[in-house]
Amino acid sequence: MNRLAKWGLGQVMGFNADAAGFQSARDMVTQMAESESAQLAGMARFMASQGLDARLRARDWTGFARRYNGPSYWKNAYDVKLKSAFEKFSSGISRDLRARAAQGALLFLGYNPGDPDGVLGQNTRRAIAAFRADAHLAAGDALDDAVFEAIMSRAGLAGG
């Protein structure tokens, strides 16, 4: 098992499997391949084991990025991206998991709904309208049940 590869949503290095609460790098990969929940739990355990949770609570984006991503964090503006994501997701705008699933499927299908963030914003509505037109569905930009099922089915994810 490659201990130098990054795994899961948090891109945890294989050599950090123990710090992420797994028995081995192989165990980490196996569990992370099974579910997004295992990926999130492993990332959270890794951050806690490194004291990074305190940096997040303090909104110390630079300190967190330096410790999580290494001394060259600034090359990819990880601290700036963290701050921006925090502001976006703490804005009070409601997130919808069904909308996020549709956004992911629309991306897969070649439409551009923007970030799969669970918000039915302008880009997502444009992508839904384009999908509806291409699929010969009634015009509009709403993500109703029929359109959701059609998007998921076309993406090979029938049963949404």
Image (cartoon, grey):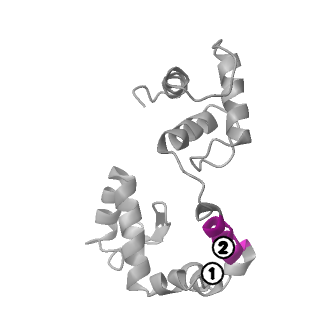
Picture quadrant where residue 158 is located: top left
Q: Is residue 138 above or below residue 7?
A: above
Residue 88 visible here: yes
Quadrant of image for the N terminus: bottom left
Q: Which mark is residue 153?
A: none
Q: Amino acid at mark 2?
A: Lys
Mark 1 surroundings within 10 Å by alpha-carbon count, few (fewer than 14), some (14 through 19), many (20 or more)? some
Q: Residue at x 69, y 45 (%)?
A: 114
Q: Residue furthest front?
A: 92
Q: Residue furthest left?
A: 23
Asked if the magenta segment contains residue 83, the reply would be yes
For residue 61, above or below residue 124:
below
**Proximity of marks 2 and 1: CB atoms separated by less than 8 Å:** yes
Q: Which residues are magenta?
A: 76-87
Q: Nearer the viewer, residue 93 or 80?
A: 93
Disc 1 marks which residue?
61
**Mark 2 or 1, nearer chain start:** 1
Residue 84 lies left or right of residue 25; in this view the side is right
Task: Determine the secondary structure under disc 2.
Answer: helix
Mark 2 crowd level (few <14, some 14–19, many ≥20, 10 Å Cα)? some
Numbered disc total? 2
Rendered location of residue 77, percent (x, y): 72, 74
Which residue occupies 60% across, 54% down?
93
Residue 58 x %, y %: 55, 86
Q: Position of residue 92 (x, y in %)?
A: 59, 59
The residue under label 2 is 83
Give the amino acid at mark 1. Answer: Trp
On the rendered structure, is 7 left or right of 137? left
Q: Nearer the viewer, residue 107 or 146?
A: 146
Queried whether the magenta region covers residue 38, the answer comes back as no
Q: Residue at x 44, y 79 (%)?
A: 47
